[in-house]
Image (tube, rainbow, N blue to C red):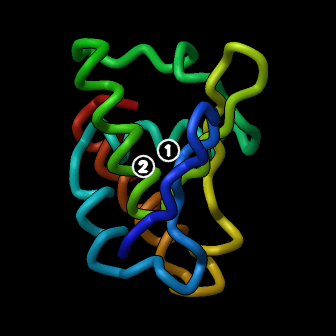
């Protein structure tokens, strides 16, 4: 996958096209507890959320890394609106490419969070 580079001076972020999204990259992105937590929050909200909405117990640079992995794998779409970077789940793309995968992972993650007292 070679995401298109944004134009010079542009604030557009590179995202894989739908046909470039690979199962291995999606599974890798969702294998990290912090990234799975981000996706769970996006799925629960159902709308775009700013990066500052997420209260993750990691540094800002690590948070930025997690969002980049999710974006480059095709799990989320990030767009700038003014000075805010908004994040949205690419649910339609993921559901079309891998039917049932996202819902199954979200259900499993919720069950695990309840089991571990993290919900």
- Relative side of 65 to 48, left or right: left
Q: Residue furthest front?
A: 8
Determine crowd level at label 1: few under 14, some 14-19, many 20+ residues with C-alpha closer than 10 A: some
Note whether 73 is above or below 54 in the view shown. Answer: below
Residue of label 1: 40
The N terminus - image quarter: bottom left
Note whether 56 is above or below 43 in the view shown. Answer: above
Residue visible at 38% across and 81% down in the picture: 22
The image position of residue 72, as x and y in percent, is 40, 57
The image position of residue 53, as x and y in percent, is 57, 16
Note whether 42 is above or below 95 in the view shown. Answer: above
**Foreground residue among 85 and 106:** 85
Answer with the quarter of the image where residue 44 lies: top right
Determine crowd level at label 2: few under 14, some 14-19, many 20+ residues with C-alpha closer than 10 A: some
Note whether 103 is above or below 65 in the view shown. Answer: below
Residue visible at 47% across and 60% down in the picture: 107
Residue visible at 73% across and 44% down in the picture: 46
- Relative side of 75 to 79, left or right: left
Badge 2 element:
helix
Residue of label 2: 110
Mark 1 and 2 residues: CB-CB less than 8 Å, in contact? Answer: yes
**Foreground residue among 62 and 81:** 81
Which is more foreground, mark 1 or mark 2?
1
The C terminus - image quarter: top left
Residue visible at 48% across and 81% down in the picture: 20
**Foreground residue among 99 and 2:** 2
């Amino acid at each position: 996958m070679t995401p298109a580079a944004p134009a010079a001076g542009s604030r557009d972020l590179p995202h894989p096209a739908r046909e470039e999204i690979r199962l291995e990259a999606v599974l890798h992105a969702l294998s990290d507890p912090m990234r799975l937590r981000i996706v769970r929050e996006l799925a629960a909200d159902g709308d775009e959320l700013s990066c500052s909405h997420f209260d993750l117990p990691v540094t800002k640079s690590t948070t930025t890394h997690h969002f980049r992995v999710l974006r480059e794998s095709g799990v989320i779409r990030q767009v700038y609106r003014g000075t805010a970077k908004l994040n949205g789940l690419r649910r339609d793309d993921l559901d079309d490419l891998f039917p049932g995968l996202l819902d199954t992972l979200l259900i499993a993650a919720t069950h695990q969070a309840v089991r571990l007292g993290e919900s």
